[in-house]
Amino acid sequence: MRPIFARIDRAAFRSNYLLAKARAPQARAWCVVKANAYGHGLLRCAEAVRDVADGFALLDISEALQLRQAQFAQPILLLEGFFDAEGLQQAAEYDLSVVLHSAPQLRLLETEALPRSVDVFLKINTGMNRLGFRPEEVPALIARLRTCSAVRSITAMTHFACADGAGIDAQWARFEQALAGSDLPRSAANSAALLRFPHSHADWVRPGIVLYGASPMPQLESAVQLGLKPVMSLESELIAIQYLQAGDQLGYGASFVATEPTCVGIVACGYGDGYPRHAGTGTPILVDGILTRTLGRVSMDMLACDLSSIPAAQIGSRVVLWGDGLPADEVATAAGTISYELFCALAPRVPVRD
Ligand SMILES: *Cc1c(COP(=O)(O)O)cnc(C)c1O
């Protein structure tokens, strides 16, 4: 077997969820497991928090049904709501909470005959300008939802654009203003807001990336500083070693040229496995637990690394691309992206181990 695999640490996932809850002790916490739990495996992660999770948030009805079929009885929130009448019917049948963000969704809610009423998360657009109703529409919407027999409960919800950077002040003010005089429960905080802005915790927080052990704001606070544990380790091995002389080139496009004798390790991992092709020379990588750097372009199935400082390395030496001992945030930063994208991009061809 090709020696690449992703190791998933369920105990780390559980520990991160409990840490998130401890940082927002007054709130319930949606365990955000969209996109197959950010590439980590939906059921694997959900099982790790079965007895402690307040609820699960995701996008696809099919993922919600997997959780229901696996006997998860917690609330499940569909973060984009339903897309058609059939989706709404299924949401009601399987007792899924729905985000309500558009007029067509509202019409369906008012016209479909449902087997039971649903919990609605009314999405208010406070400045992200992706989904949601305008703040000034909110009082009339709440009145309308209160008379709608398909609605069991209403929670007001918004999503922050800059919780990891400039902050949430303007959006929070618009949220509060839209809800002035209303005692509806609220949900606003993603991972970054949960960690940085306790006043936004409200009734339900929505941590995602922290559950997977990465920092939502690596420039401000690292995952290690936050006490988070990496959940996914992408691991492989050296499958060849090359000895370059000064002037020798390496890989496609010859983007790396040795300026001195250089020992190079070839790793069985490439962009076909989900490793970012944009990670240029210098991206951190661990060989036999020792930090070194990648060299040259990432190919589909292989990449190269510098073994100059690791003379004991040999074919079969263990390589960690990210995870155990090498924060995904550091690889992501070197590749000009974020940990979220690394995790979600893990290719189906990479076997997963526990
Ligand atoms: C993905 C998502 C989250 C979680 O965001 P993180 O930055 O991963 O914590 C929270 N709320 C909504 C609406 C989302 O789509």
Image (tube, grey):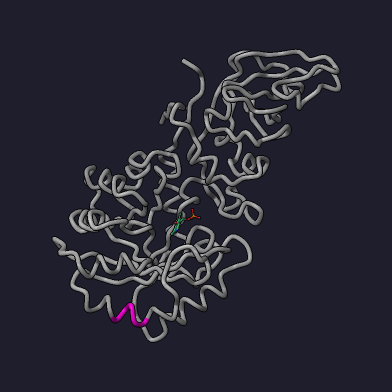
Relative to 19, is 300 above or below?
A: above
Residue 140 lies in the magenta stretch: yes
**Which quadrant of the rendered structure holds the C terminus?**
top left
- Pinpoint residue 175: horizontal percent, then vertical percent: 46, 76
Residue 41 lies in the magenta stretch: no
Residue 302: name its quadrant.
top right
In the image, 300: left or right of 45? right
**Is residue 42 in view?**
yes
Which region of the structure is painted magenta? 139-143
Residue 26: name its quadrant.
bottom left
- Pinpoint residue 179: horizontal percent, then vertical percent: 41, 80
Q: Nearer the viewer, residue 282 or 151?
A: 151
Relative to 163, is 145 above or below?
A: below
Give the residue at x 31% y 45%: 63
In the image, 98: left or right of 256? left
Q: Main secondary structure of the magenta part?
A: helix
Residue 150: name its quadrant.
bottom left
Q: Nearer the viewer, residue 279 or 205?
A: 279
- Pinpoint residue 128: horizontal percent, then vertical percent: 52, 66
**Is residue 54 in view?**
no
Give the residue at x 62% y 13%: 315
Count the labels in the image.
0
- Pinpoint residue 163: horizontal percent, then vertical percent: 56, 63
Give the residue at x 46% y 49%: 211
Give the residue at x 20% y 57%: 89
